[in-house]
Image (spheres, grey):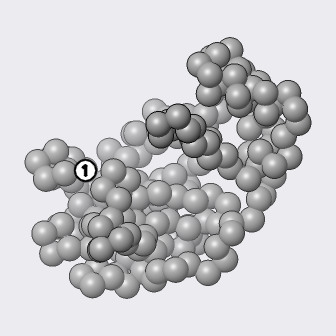
Amino acid sequence: MSYRKEGDLLKLRLHEVFLSADDKVLKSVADFVNNKRDAIKTLRAFVRVHRDTGYPSKRKVPLRSPQGKVYNLQDIFNELNRRYFHSRLKSEVIWGNTYKKGRVMKRILGSYHRQSDIIVINPILDSKRVPLYYLAFVVYHEMLHADIGVVDFGGRRIVHSRKFRARERAFHDYQRAIKWERENL
């Protein structure tokens, strides 16, 4: 769920899981948007019950492939899968989409989509100026999401748990990747 104001209009985006929401949940959405933060309890309870209902991804076939202009994500994935995951991950890995006039979203470097088991990497990283070790780190980070999943801690969803962070630091070029990210992104 996300929302933003544009002048006098409020634009609200909801996940398709909210199609099955009853009036109480929809009222909680409205309350949340109106800064009534006690509505979050109802929304969290609804999402907790419905998040694993298996809503199919609208996109059955990826729009992009793992082969970029500079890097092949499948090669990177296969090496990391062998080295860190005993080749047990079966996720698909693809480059994300570019946007109008060749622009790409810069804020999110990678994402993992559990329902479709797809790792999507931002095409801004498909560049000769991006070192292979950094791209591999981003792919590894998303592979950890595929492997570990989300931890439920007292009703809160934790995507970067202590276990996740510890395994992330086990990446062979972790320090160098973090340093490159700080200096270049």
**Which residue is at a point 40% across and 39% down the rendered structure image?**
165
Quarter of the image with the N terminus in it: top right
* 150 w.r.t. 88: above or below: above
The image quarter containing residue 146 is bottom right
Task: Judge the density around disc 1: few (<14), some (14-19), many (≥20) Cα neighbours within 10 Å.
Answer: some
Residue 69 x %, y %: 27, 84
* 46 w.r.t. 155: above or below: below
Residue 130 x %, y %: 18, 66
Residue 104 x %, y %: 33, 65
Using the image as rendered, state which of residue 146 and residue 121 is in the foreground: 121
Q: Is residue 150 visible?
A: no
* Number of numbered markers: 1
Instruction: Name the residue that disc number 1 marks.
Output: 174
**Relative to residue 101, is residue 176 drawn left or right?**
left
**Which residue is at a point 70% across and 28% down the rendered structure image?**
30
**Which residue is at a point 35% across and 59% down the rendered structure image?**
105
**Relative to residue 112, is residue 37 drawn left or right?**
right
Using the image as rendered, state which of residue 57 and residue 4 is in the foreground: 4
Q: Is residue 112 visible?
A: yes
Residue lying farthest to the front in this orientation = 8
Element under disc 1: helix
Using the image as rendered, state which of residue 56 and residue 130 is in the foreground: 56
Residue 66 x %, y %: 42, 80
Give the residue type at disc 1: Tyr
**Relative to residue 36, is residue 46 drawn left or right?**
right
